[in-house]
Amino acid sequence: MLGKLWLIPNTLSEGPIERSIPEEVRDVASGLTHFFVESEKGARAFLKRLPLRIPIQDAEVLALDDSRAMERMLDVLRQGRDAAILSDAGLPCVADPGAQAVLQAHRIGAEVKPLVGPCSILLALMGSGLNGQSFAFCGYLPVEKIERERKIRELEQLSSRHKQTQIFMETPYRSQKLFESLLETCSDGTWLSVAANLTSADQTIGTRRVAEWKNGRVEFGKAPCIFCLSSLP
Amino acid sequence: MLGKLWLIPNTLSEGPIERSIPEEVRDVASGLTHFFVESEKGARAFLKRLPLRIPIQDAEVLALDDSRAMERMLDVLRQGRDAAILSDAGLPCVADPGAQAVLQAHRIGAEVKPLVGPCSILLALMGSGLNGQSFAFCGYLPVEKIERERKIRELEQLSSRHKQTQIFMETPYRSQKLFESLLETCSDGTWLSVAANLTSADQTIGTRRVAEWKNGRVEFGKAPCIFCLSSLP
């Protein structure tokens, strides 16, 4: 009998863990002992907030990018013990590492158990008011100006052609730059939603047409932002 | 001062609400009084599981497809009182009604507050082991055979061209038929993941290449299913 592979959500922001992690998830996570993680530091900070059933120093915490991680995880599962994948923030495997490990767990026939938790992409989409019947997430946009503007125009076309909300993100220190690039490049009628600091006390979500965003200065500072774009009328 | 518009997640399956709804979310929801909902029946079943702070018969519960709903919701917000959007299952506004109401709330300047809860689309993606760095959700596939097969081939092409996992769903009684259509239409090398009965005790998630799915009969019965498809090697 193989062990199960649990996919454990992490919080997106400071503040009480009860805000975004259901208690059954915390209960399951507390009983686990082998964690394969985005970063050891991020994982240990999360595990310290759980009532772990073993001393934290006895838990195995191994970064997914460690060359030994995949074989070790499969060994744990083959020995009939459960393993967990954990990211530094949000859902593992979604804009985050873990998918390769999940695929390997499927290959050996282990049961995969994704758990409920916060996902900035979906919170931004819900909160945007833009089309949630059809949407695409495409990660980060190119950093280089010409490439980025080309990509923004492609996203407008994809949104129009497939009636699809296009979702993308940016590292905090480049959010303002991307926002200004969007205002310069998009059609005035394009809808743009910006969700900043999701789940934190400073959370803001604004949805306007590009022409309306241009009236008045908006500063996102160093906030982590998720952007949703729609070319629908 | 305008009221806030809260977007309240609902459970995906029977069983304890603690499994998938964080306690802070239940706490916020319990204090609300004006609910704009997918169906009155589904909403009341959820509200009965909360420690609502008013008698349930005093809560306003109005279906979003009622012609009075939008104006009424905006009135509540304009009067400085909070309102909520609630679906029968999962996240409002994501493959579910609510986006138009959220957009109108943004138009009048009300604060929109999406809350954390279960999303079958994201649980399926996490659990699939397929690419979660770039993905698209496209709702339901066409029912008519020729149209459906055309769409499946288009999804394979989109997945290959944009390196994007394609996610779609089906009503329970047609899941088996769609599954068989996928096996008939897709290339043997295409990855197909099927997540059935997510968050319930009967949950299963399987990811295989189409050629492997063809070896052996799989029955999904009347299970609600989410499908993830990837043409990556």
Image (cartoon, coloured by chain):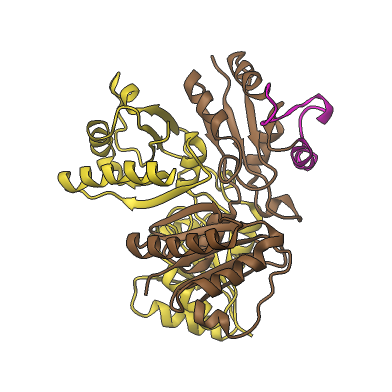
Chain colours: A yellow, B brown
Magenta stretch contains residue A72: no
Q: Quadrant of the N terminus of chain A?
A: bottom right
Magenta stretch contains residue B49: yes
Q: Quadrant of the C terminus of chain A?
A: top left
Against A91, residue B205 (above or below) is below
Query: Is residue A17 in view?
Result: yes
Report the side of B177 relative to A65 (left or right).
right
Query: Is residue A50 in view?
Result: no
Residue at 79% in and 39% down: B41
What is the tally of numbered marks visible in this picture? 0
Where does the image place residue A20, in percent across and percent down from the top left? 56, 46
Where does the image place residue A71, in percent across and percent down from the top left? 42, 83
Residue at 46% in and 60% down: B166
Span colored in magenta: B40-68
Where does the image place residue B4, in percent across and percent down from the top left? 57, 25
Where does the image place residue A211, in percent across and percent down from the top left? 31, 23
Give the camera-side residue of B199 and B130: B130
Give the camera-side residue of B44 and A210: A210
Residue at 69% in and 34% down: B37
Report the side of B226 relative to A173 (left or right).
right
Residue B99: name its quadrant.
top right
Q: Residue furthest front?
A: B146
Give the camera-side residue of B145 and B56: B145
